[in-house]
Image (spheres, rainbow, N blue to C red):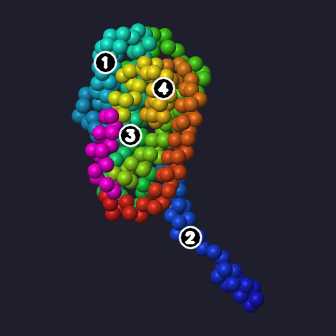
Amino acid sequence: MPIIITEVILADITPSPSPQTFQVNVAIMDLYQGLMSWRIWWSLGWQDIRLRYRRSQLGPFWITLSTAIMIYSMGFLYAKLFKIDLSTYYPYLATGLITWTFISSIILEANEAFVENAGFIRQTCLPFSIYILRLLTRNFIVLLHNILPVLPILIYYKITPTADSVFYLIFGLILFLSIGYSFGLLLAILGSRFRDMKPIVASLVQICFLITPILWQHSMLSPKLQALMNFNPFYQLIQLLRAPLLGQIPSTNTLTYCIILALMGLSLMVIVLARCRHRIAFWV
């Protein structure tokens, strides 16, 4: 009898987790279960590509063809306008364009990630992070297709990868996907709550394309503007992948910036998901 009484007393005085702690734990579990359900989001992402190009003769290689036309036409034109050597400008433009396409596609599609999957959200209990991973999967497949037109340019201008550049390419891609994962989920939550986010983000993406060194080179700016451009997150994200593709190593500034950005995105993702997770089904 004394043992039973002691257990009851201890149960009464043991503090229960606060609602905030509980919500954070649920958010972290959602992210973990989403990552572990890789068969689901990989199959859904691959299915998106197949459905997008069903009854097409070339299938996803239409992406490769359109990207090749854009790169080879714009490269020659802008090299003449800026009076830059093609051997320097062509690889710079090609790698920058495919990286920007990857970034902009994730941003634009993330706004509608939960809205487009409203049927799944209302009828199933899948982790919300699965829908962001589905988005990243299909865009990663598109990125692999877009790299094909760049390879002849790199081969022609004798840009050979080194062991260090391959390592930083893999590391940068993992870091890049983690940033897309965290900020993509944040945009999906905002897009499901505020439907005006889609046109606003689309307009901002167009502006960012023009002010980011993609069609023009970072070295064309004055020293003060170059220092200011280092705070542009899109420039740093592009450099994270563009530098290894060109056989170079990303600068310490780029690596530090992107690592801090990934940590900030992960923290914000957990906080916002913990506060809004139970409302998403009603917003969509």
Q: Earlier in the sequence, mark 3 or mark 1?
A: 1
According to the picture, the residue beneath numbered tag 3 turns out to be: 106
Res 174 visible: no
Residue 162 horizontal/vertical position (percent): 58, 19
Residue 144 horizontal/vertical position (percent): 41, 29
Q: CA distance from mark 4 to mark 2?
A: 49 Å
> Is mark 3 in CB contact (under 8 Å) with mark 2?
no
According to the picture, the residue beneath numbered tag 1 turns out to be: 74
Q: Residue furthest front?
A: 224
Q: Nearer the viewer, residue 224 or 173?
A: 224
Q: Which mark is residue 18?
A: 2
Q: CA distance from mark 3 to mark 1?
A: 23 Å
> How busy is the neighbourhood of tag 3: few (under 14 within 10 Å), some, or many (20 plus)?
many
Q: Earlier in the sequence, mark 4 or mark 1?
A: 1
Q: For the point 48% across and 26% down, which residue is it?
A: 224
Q: Tag 3, which secondary structure?
A: helix
Residue 172 horizontal/vertical position (percent): 53, 32
> Is mark 4 in CB contact (under 8 Å) with mark 1?
no
Pair 4/1: label in front: 4
Pair 3/1: label in front: 1
What amino acid is found at the position of numbered circle 4 in the picture? Lys
Is 163 rendered above or below residue 118? Answer: above
Is 134 rendered above or below residue 215? Answer: below
Over which residues does the magenta segment extend? 192-207
Q: Earlier in the sequence, mark 4 or mark 2?
A: 2
According to the picture, the residue beneath numbered tag 4 turns out to be: 224
Residue 133 horizontal/vertical position (percent): 43, 45
What amino acid is found at the position of numbered circle 1 in the picture? Met
